Image (tube, helix red, strand yellow):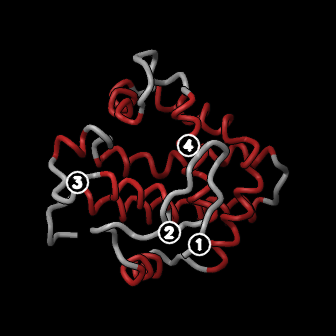
């Protein structure tokens, strides 16, 4: 498995897949079905190099989009672990989680440690209340997939990349996000339906 350096101040996350996490064969099949290729992996690494110093700007754009939809903003408050201030102000926790998500999405799309950690932290039987206390409703995960990609485009355009490079990076990012949504869906669906 890929090992990622932790973000500053973050303990290393175990890379052993927790119980219930899809195995490498299942993840590989999802990647193949989603047409994820080595070119996509290269495009994601390049995307990280472009966005690494712009994660706060990227997050601000995403939060601005989310704030335009109060229902979505309310649904995403479960991601916050800090005080009750405005959920769309971009707290330290949200900034850290977003940077970690982007880093792992770009450098380790088939083995996102944040997702493995989530599986490890949730109880094996995953009752609905424990899941809803940690994650937004599943429909929002699906609905946010494309806006996350479209929002990144604004930053890519300002980096003076060729249009075909931007398209390639956006396509790779969408494939990686959809793979994560597919992996997350196992937490939401009844046993045997995934």
Residue 137's place in the image compared with 185, above or below, is above
Count of numbered circles in the view: 4
In front: label 2 or label 3: 3
Mark 3 and mark 2 in contact (Cβ < 8 Å)? no
Q: Could you say whether the residue bearing mark 1 is in a helix, strand or loop?
A: loop
Q: Rate crowding at label 4 as few (under 14), some (14 to 19) or many (20 or more) other CA atoms within 10 Å.
A: some
Q: Quadrant of the C terminus?
A: bottom left
- Residue 114: give x, y in percent of width and height: 47, 55
Q: Rate crowding at label 3 as few (under 14), some (14 to 19) or many (20 or more) other CA atoms within 10 Å.
A: few
Which residue bears the numbered disc 4?
Answer: 98
Disc 2 and disc 4: Cα gap in Å? 17 Å
Nearest the viewer among 38 and 25 is 25
First in sequence: mark 2 or mark 4? Answer: 4
Q: Could you say whether the residue bearing mark 2 is in a helix, strand or loop?
A: loop
First in sequence: mark 4 or mark 1? Answer: 1
Nearest the viewer among 119 and 45 is 119
- Residue 68: give x, y in percent of width and height: 46, 25
Which residue bears the numbered disc 2?
Answer: 111
Report whether 182 appears left or right of 95. Answer: left
Which residue bears the numbered disc 1?
Answer: 2
Disc 4 and disc 1: Cα gap in Å? 20 Å
- Residue 30: give x, y in percent of width and height: 40, 76
Mark 2 and mark 1 in contact (Cβ < 8 Å)? yes
First in sequence: mark 2 or mark 3? Answer: 2
Dividing the picture into quadrants, the one containing residue 180 is: bottom left
């Amino acid at each position: 498995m890929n090992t990622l350096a932790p973000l500053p101040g973050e303990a290393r996350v175990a890379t052993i897949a927790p119980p219930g996490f899809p195995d490498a064969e299942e993840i590989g099949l999802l990647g193949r079905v989603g047409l994820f290729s080595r070119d996509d992996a290269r495009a994601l690494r390049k995307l990280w190099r472009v966005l690494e110093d712009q994660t706060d700007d990227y997050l601000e754009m995403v939060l601005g989009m989310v704030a335009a939809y109060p229902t979505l903003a309310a649904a995403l408050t479960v991601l916050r672990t800090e005080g009750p201030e405005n959920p769309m102000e971009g707290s330290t926790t949200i900034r850290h989680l977003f940077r970690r998500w982007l880093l792992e999405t770009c450098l380790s799309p088939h083995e996102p440690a944040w997702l493995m950690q989530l599986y490890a932290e949730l109880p094996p039987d995953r009752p609905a209340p424990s899941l809803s206390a940690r994650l937004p409703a599943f429909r929002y995960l699906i609905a946010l997939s494309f806006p996350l990609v479209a929002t990144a485009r604004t930053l890519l355009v300002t980096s003076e990349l060729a249009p075909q490079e931007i398209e390639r990076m956006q396509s790779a990012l969408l494939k990686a996000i959809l793979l994560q949504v597919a992996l997350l869906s196992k937490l939401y669906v009844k046993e045997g339906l995934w």
